[in-house]
């Protein structure tokens, strides 16, 4: 289903990145042993440097535990 949306992404979403102060990229999954519920979501936060009043943030520190399910 991702491939089916790639043309729209390339045409409308990707060109907007150059104007964004921050972009959250969803990365391909890495299989984790015994993760039967597939709750692991890999992301990358990319922030523009030098934006006034825009301090760097961190999504989660190493070892952080997050619970929940997207959309719930």
Image (cartoon, rainbow, N blue to C red):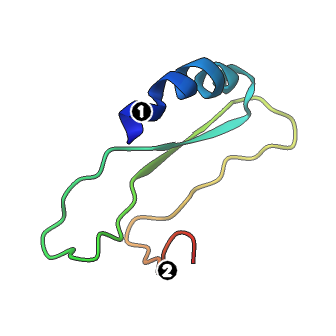
Q: Residue furthest right?
A: 52
**Picture residue at 57% right of the left edge, 78% below the top:** 72
**Real-space Cα separation, disc 2 to disc 1, in angstroms:** 28 Å
Above or below residue 51? Residue 71 is: below
**Picture residue at 80% right of the left edge, 43% below the top:** 54
Above or below residue 3? Residue 18 is: above
Q: Nearer the viewer, residue 66 or 55?
A: 66
Above or below residue 16? Residue 68 is: below
The residue to which callout 2 is attached is 68
14 lies left or right of 39: right
Place of residue 20 in the rendered image (x, y in percent of width and height, measured from the top left): 73, 30
7 lies left or right of 16: left
The residue to which callout 1 is attached is 4
6 lies left or right of 17: left
Considering the numbered disc 2 on the image, is that residue within a helix, a strand or a loop? loop
Local packing at callout 1 (Cα closer than 10 Å; few below 14, some 14-19, many 20+) is few
Q: Nearer the viewer, mark 2 or mark 1?
A: 1
């Amino acid at each position: 289903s991702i491939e089916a949306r790639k043309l729209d992404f390339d045409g409308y979403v990707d060109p907007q990145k150059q104007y964004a102060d921050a972009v959250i990229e969803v990365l391909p999954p890495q299989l984790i042993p015994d993760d039967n519920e597939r709750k692991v979501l890999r992301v990358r936060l990319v922030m523009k440097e030098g934006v006034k009043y825009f301090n760097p943030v961190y999504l989660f520190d190493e070892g952080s535990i997050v619970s929940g399910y997207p959309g719930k």
